[in-house]
Image (cartoon, grey):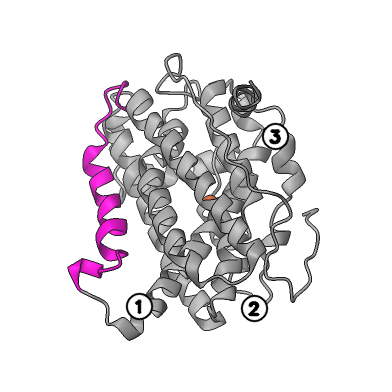
């Protein structure tokens, strides 16, 4: 909460230049249960590799479309940096699918197709293949940018959670998986204001923002639950407990893991979402850029990327 309080007239609240760090990760030594003896939490978090690439590539496409509508030079630069960072996140997590989950013989294609349907059909420029009338094209763009701003609130608060979670380290979690999570978390914190600033700059209003979070919250939770239960069902160490999305085990275990500090609870997530409903919500004060940059200064992947860049 150390971020500077920005002036209300300032279009961009981003307090750092958004750099693309060309990271790479070697998952060859990372076990499926990357938190030892905790398959539930391992899968619950590993599912993000399957959800994020389609979403983040969609973000890149949409913000490229938004660029011509932005007439503030600083915000334009923020958006360009945001696009580069999200593209690198998507690429890194795609590696998480092919070099980690699929190497561990997890079937992820059927779930990824459902995620892609959301972004490539429902949220497409032509939703469900239907052309949007010319006079509504800008509104459709701003509506989707608002949905992304709501999702980016989650990536910011979850990023803060990932940086501050000490239980994963205590349990001896795999360092490569921790690094991809925390590198991504840190960049989400760095660019936490961009989507919100763009939404405000393009005339996005408060009632729509409220509605967008009402939509985004169940969609985020729904994808998370569906995808992680899909991974768990393939794992013989817990499949017999029937970890179905609507099953007792899944929800009881989530509560248990959140109590032991392994996962954020559903209630915690709902509380985070509720702050977005406030008319005075401001992403700049949701997290600290200094905290993010402190991690990036010691992230093995970010340091390797910086060394390659400097060579
Ligand atoms: Fe991201
Ligand atoms: Fe992001």
The single residue placed furthest to the left in the displayed view is: 129
243 lies left or right of 182:
left
Magenta region, residue range: 102-130
Which is more foreground, mark 1 or mark 2? Answer: 1
What percent of the width, then of the height, locates residue 44? 43, 39
- Disc 3 from disc 2: Cα separation: 31 Å
For residue 205, which quarter of the picture? bottom right
What percent of the width, then of the height, locates residue 168? 59, 29
Q: Residue drawn 44% across and 53% down?
A: 60
Q: Earlier in the sequence, mark 1 or mark 3?
A: 1
Helix, strand or loop at label 3? It is helix
Which is more foreground, mark 3 or mark 2? Answer: 3
- Disc 1 from disc 3: Cα separation: 40 Å
- For mark 3, what is the residue? 295
Helix, strand or loop at label 2? It is loop
Which label belongs to residue 279? 2
The single residue placed furthest to the top in the displayed view is: 29
- Disc 1 from disc 2: Cα separation: 26 Å
Q: In which quadrant is the C terminus drawn?
A: top right
Helix, strand or loop at label 1? It is helix
Q: Earlier in the sequence, mark 1 or mark 2?
A: 1
- For mark 1, what is the residue? 137
């Amino acid at each position: 909460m150390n971020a500077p309080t920005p002036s209300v007239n300032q279009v961009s609240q981003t307090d750092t230049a958004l750099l693309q760090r060309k990271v790479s990760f070697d998952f060859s030594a990372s076990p499926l249960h990357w938190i030892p003896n905790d398959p539930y939490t391992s899968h619950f978090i590993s599912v993000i590799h399957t959800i994020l690439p389609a979403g983040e590539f969609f973000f890149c496409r949409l913000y490229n479309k938004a660029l011509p509508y932005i007439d503030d030079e600083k915000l334009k630069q923020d958006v360009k940096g945001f696009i580069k960072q999200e593209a690198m996140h998507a690429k890194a997590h795609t590696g998480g699918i092919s070099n980690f989950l699929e190497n561990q013989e997890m079937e992820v294609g059927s779930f990824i197709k459902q995620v892609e349907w959301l972004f490539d059909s429902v949220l497409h420029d032509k939703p469900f293949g239907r052309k949007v009338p010319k006079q509504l094209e800008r509104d459709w763009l701003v509506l989707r940018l608002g949905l992304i701003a709501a999702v980016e609130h989650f990536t910011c608060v979850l990023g803060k959670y990932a940086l501050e979670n000490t239980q994963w380290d205590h349990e001896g979690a795999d360092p490569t998986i921790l690094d991809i999570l925390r590198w991504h978390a840190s960049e989400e914190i760095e660019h936490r204001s961009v989507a919100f600033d763009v939404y405000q700059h393009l005339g996005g209003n408060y009632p729509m923002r409220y509605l967008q979070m009402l939509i985004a919250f169940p969609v985020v939770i729904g994808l998370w639950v569906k995808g992680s239960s899909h991974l768990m069902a393939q794992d013989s160490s817990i499949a017999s407990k029937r970890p179905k999305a609507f099953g007792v085990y899944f929800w009881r275990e989530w509560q248990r893991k959140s109590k032991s500090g392994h996962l954020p609870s559903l209630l915690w997530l709902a509380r985070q979402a509720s702050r977005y409903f406030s008319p005075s919500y401001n992403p700049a004060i949701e997290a600290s850029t200094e905290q993010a940059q402190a991690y990036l200064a010691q992230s093995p992947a970010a340091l390797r990327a910086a060394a390659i860049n400097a060579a």
